[in-house]
């Protein structure tokens, strides 16, 4: 049987085995290029750094660990956006903290680096394919600079059709919350689906709801046409009882570093 490439919560791409492996190798190389470049360009000794989650962000974490080990970066403290990223950072010996510490130094983050599932022309994002949207959003909101790292497959004309919108909801009365999401005027045409799987990291087939690091469920909202007004949709989702956080990251991006076959570009 042909394998499928799981691109996150919203997209699963069926490919022949050889083409699939080649595609994954190429995409991994592009992810590594942007992950390393973001760290090389934006992380300096003495900084507090927000570490994103996902296969692209993992390369940025790897690079921070590498530069620390080589002594090219010193006095770094990092805040991970998921249990997975925390574990990777610990393995690499990156000193960690949380936003909850009383020292004022740690109430502000110098730079956060993370991947995204979709990036629109205004640099608004869909995130949360890996289920880490809440921790990502709170860390990235606290950052002076939020650097997004993607391969060019993530760039889109409008958010929605290329990747389903993840919404993190309370397990209690989840069916009710899912119906309420479907009825939001700004999400017209969106079809919510409860994410199933053994972890919220990826949408994998399974009969039990996927559970996030926060003990909550994820609903993925699928769209045939772009969300007309992403900031309005973000506000309406936040107004719903039962919704904890959503994967629309509007007006947060400082810069996007994009890797494609023809090289690396950056916006703005
Ligand atoms: C996790 C995320 C990821 O940043 C997003 O899913 C992109 O992941 P990848 O780099 O693996 O494509 O939002 O919640």
Image (cartoon, grey):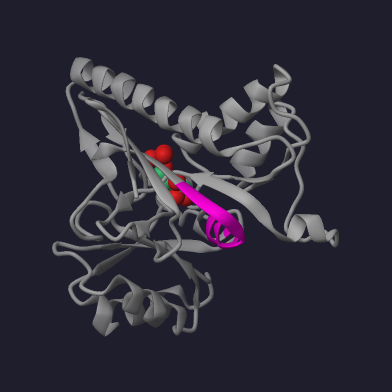
Residue 185 sits in which quadrant?
bottom left
26 in magenta: no
Q: Tell me which image quadrant ligand 1 sits in.
A: top left
Residue farthest toward the left in the current orientation of the protein? 225
Closest to the observer: 114 or 12? Answer: 114
Please say whether residue 136 is one of the residues in the magenta stretch: yes
| Residue at horizontal 74 percent and vertical 61 percent from the top | 107
Dividing the picture into quadrants, the one containing residue 105 is bottom right
User: Which sits in the foreground, 230 or 185?
Assistant: 230
257 is higher (above) or lower (below) than 24: below
Spot occupied by residue 229 in the image (x, y as percentages of width and height): 26, 74
Label count reads 0
Q: Position of residue 168 (x, y in %)?
A: 47, 65
Horizontal placement of 42 versus 156: left or right?
Answer: right
Horizontal side, residue 93 vs residue 64: left or right: right
**Residue 134's spot in the image, x, y percent?**
54, 61
The residue range painted magenta reads 135-147
User: Which residue is at 47% across, 47% downward?
Assistant: 147
């Amino acid at each position: 049987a042909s394998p499928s490439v799981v691109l996150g919560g919203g997209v699963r791409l069926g490919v022949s085995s050889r083409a699939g492996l080649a595609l994954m190798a190429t995409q991994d190389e592009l992810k590594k290029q942007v992950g390393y470049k973001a760290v090389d360009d934006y992380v300096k000794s003495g900084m507090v750094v927000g570490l994103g989650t996902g296969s692209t962000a993992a390369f940025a974490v790897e690079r921070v660990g590498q530069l620390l080990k080589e002594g090219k970066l010193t006095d770094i403290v990092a805040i991970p956006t998921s249990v997975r990223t925390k574990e990777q950072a610990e393995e690499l010996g990156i000193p960690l903290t949380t936003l909850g510490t009383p020292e004022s130094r740690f109430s502000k983050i110098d730079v956060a680096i993370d991947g995204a599932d979709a990036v629109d022309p205004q640099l608004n994002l869909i995130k949360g394919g890996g289920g880490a949207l809440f921790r990502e959003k709170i860390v990235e909101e606290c950052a002076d600079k939020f650097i997004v790292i993607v391969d060019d497959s993530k760039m889109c004309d409008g958010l929605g059709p290329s990747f389903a919108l993840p919404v993190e909801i309370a397990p209690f009365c989840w069916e009710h919350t899912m119906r309420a999401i479907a009825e939001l005027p700004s999400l017209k045409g969106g079809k919510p689906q409860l994410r199933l799987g053994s972890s919220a990291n990826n949408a994998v087939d399974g009969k039990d709801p996927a559970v996030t690091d926060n003990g909550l469920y994820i609903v993925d909202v699928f769209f045939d046409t772009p969300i007309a007004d992403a900031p309005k949709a973000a506000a309406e989702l936040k107004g719903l009882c039962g919704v904890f956080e959503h994967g629309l990251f509007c007006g947060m991006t400082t810069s996007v570093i994009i890797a494609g076959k023809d090289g690396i570009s950056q916006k703005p």
